């Protein structure tokens, strides 16, 4: 390579960002701390949140406002779609920003081809799995739910397919026995932000070369449906224990006893050898509420009644006696 060309490639990059939740905010904070120029932030429109359902900005917007970055919040990005005016505004902002690369992290909108083609160095995505395993919307939760021993993060150059683009690099992380969706999220967000900085340095130096994904081992992390959050005790206990951890803290898992519904914050495998109908209470004491499952038993240790706060089982039972023989319902309530 001509020395002058290499020097030009090493000029500081202008890095636009597109993201919404905390996973993306970790990357944005790391970019700013590393001294990158961020001329524009795309993020989802504010959403109702909290008890008063007042519109609240996402984590990325909160960081951008504190750092006085330009923020654009299109409702859509298709130039011929329902929100074409929003898309045109976003396009004009991106042209003005003249970013070398767009970093996309948990943005929540599909990027159309016009946007994928705009940055000279392309659009980079931090994806929370070891691609091609767990392409799709919920890779962190699906990895725990499936009982995977490991997962990781991938830095991918985006293309039109769903998480099919070539990968610059990956980092593997173990999934610990007690990991929840929340704890694994935090570790992956940190690892992904560090890996992104490495790829940006390589792009800046002109030495980044992505590798096409393998066609073997492809799996899809489907978006979590609300019906999945209701525990079905006809399933094996080990599946339910993994789902409770995977969906904690969001969207959480639920169950109900009679007319009372609960959010399940923590559980572990029970040790009872007694056979009973799925959902039947085998014991209820300070250690937990043990329920029969399709295979094995599940010990619920921390619950939250609707409209209340999370409590350990001992505290719950003081205000709401639960006895062996009672039965928790399986699956989602009838519509």
Image (cartoon, rainbow, N blue to C red):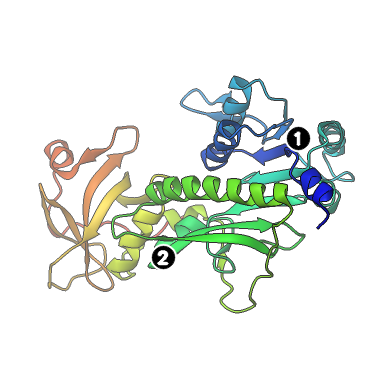
Among the two numbered marks 1 and 2 on one chain, the one whose residue lies closer to the N terminus: 1
**Residue situated in front as seen by the camera: 14 or 70:** 14
* Image position of 212 with respect to 141: above or below: below
Q: Position of residue 252 (x, y in %)?
A: 40, 48
Helix, strand or loop under label 1: loop
Q: Does any portion of residue 56 appear in the rendered image?
A: no
Q: Which mark is residue 150?
A: 2
Residue in the foreground of this view, choosing between 143 and 302: 143
Residue in the picture at 77% in, 51% down: 122
- Residue 186, above or below 155: above
Label 1 and label 2: CA atoms lie apart by: 36 Å
Residue 49 x/y as whole percent: 52, 29
Q: From where the camera sits, is residue 125 visible? A: yes
The local secondary structure at tag 2 comes to strand
Say left or right for 64 vs 145. Answer: right
Image disc number at residue 289: none
Q: Which residue is mark 1?
A: 74
Question: Whole-percent x and y of residue 196?
Answer: 59, 48
Crowd around label 1: few <14 · some 14–19 · many ≥20 (10 Å): many
What x and y, as percent, mark residue 74? 76, 35
Badge 2: how crowded within 10 Å, few (<14), some, or many (20+)? some
Residue at the bottom extreme?
216
Q: Is residue 7 left or right of residue 229?
A: right
Which quadrant of the rendered structure holds the N terminus?
Answer: bottom right
256 or 224: nearer the viewer: 224
Q: Residue at x 67, y 35 (%)?
A: 43
Horizontal side of residue 102 vs 51, given as left or right: right
Q: Residue at x 15, y 48 (%)?
A: 322
């Amino acid at each position: 390579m001509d020395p002058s060309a290499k020097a030009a490639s090493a000029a500081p990059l202008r890095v636009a960002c597109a993201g919404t939740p905390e996973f993306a905010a970790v990357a944005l904070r790391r970019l700013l701390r590393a001294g990158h120029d961020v001329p524009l932030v795309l993020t989802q429109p504010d959403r109702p949140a909290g008890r008063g359902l007042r519109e609240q900005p996402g984590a990325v917007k909160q960081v951008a406002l504190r750092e006085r970055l330009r923020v654009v919040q299109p409702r859509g990005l298709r130039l011929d779609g329902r929100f074409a005016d929003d898309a045109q505004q976003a396009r004009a902002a991106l042209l003005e920003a003249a970013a070398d690369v767009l970093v996309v992290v948990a943005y929540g909108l599909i990027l159309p081809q016009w946007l994928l083609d705009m940055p000279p160095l392309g659009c980079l995505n931090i994806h929370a799995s070891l691609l091609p395993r767990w392409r799709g919307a919920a890779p962190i939760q699906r990895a725990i739910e499936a009982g995977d021993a490991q997962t990781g993060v991938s830095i991918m150059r985006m293309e039109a397919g769903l998480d099919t683009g070539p990968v610059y690099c990956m980092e593997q992380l173990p999934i610990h026995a007690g990991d929840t969706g929340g704890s694994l999220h935090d570790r992956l967000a940190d690892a992904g932000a560090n890996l992104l900085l490495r790829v940006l340095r390589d792009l800046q130096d002109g030495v980044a070369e992505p590798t096409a994904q393998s066609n073997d081992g492809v799996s899809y992390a489907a978006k979590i449906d609300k019906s999945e959050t209701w525990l079905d005790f006809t399933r094996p206990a080990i599946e339910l224990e993994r789902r409770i951890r995977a969906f904690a803290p969001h969207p959480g898992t639920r169950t109900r006893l009679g007319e009372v519904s609960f959010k399940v914050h923590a559980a572990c495998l029970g040790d009872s050898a007694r056979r009973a109908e799925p959902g039947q209470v085998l014991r209820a004491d300070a250690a937990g509420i043990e329920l029969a499952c399709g295979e094995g038993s599940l010990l619920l240790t921390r619950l939250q009644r609707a409209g209340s706060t999370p409590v350990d089982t001992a505290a719950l039972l003081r205000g709401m006696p639960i006895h062996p023989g009672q039965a928790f319902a399986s699956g989602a309530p009838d519509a």
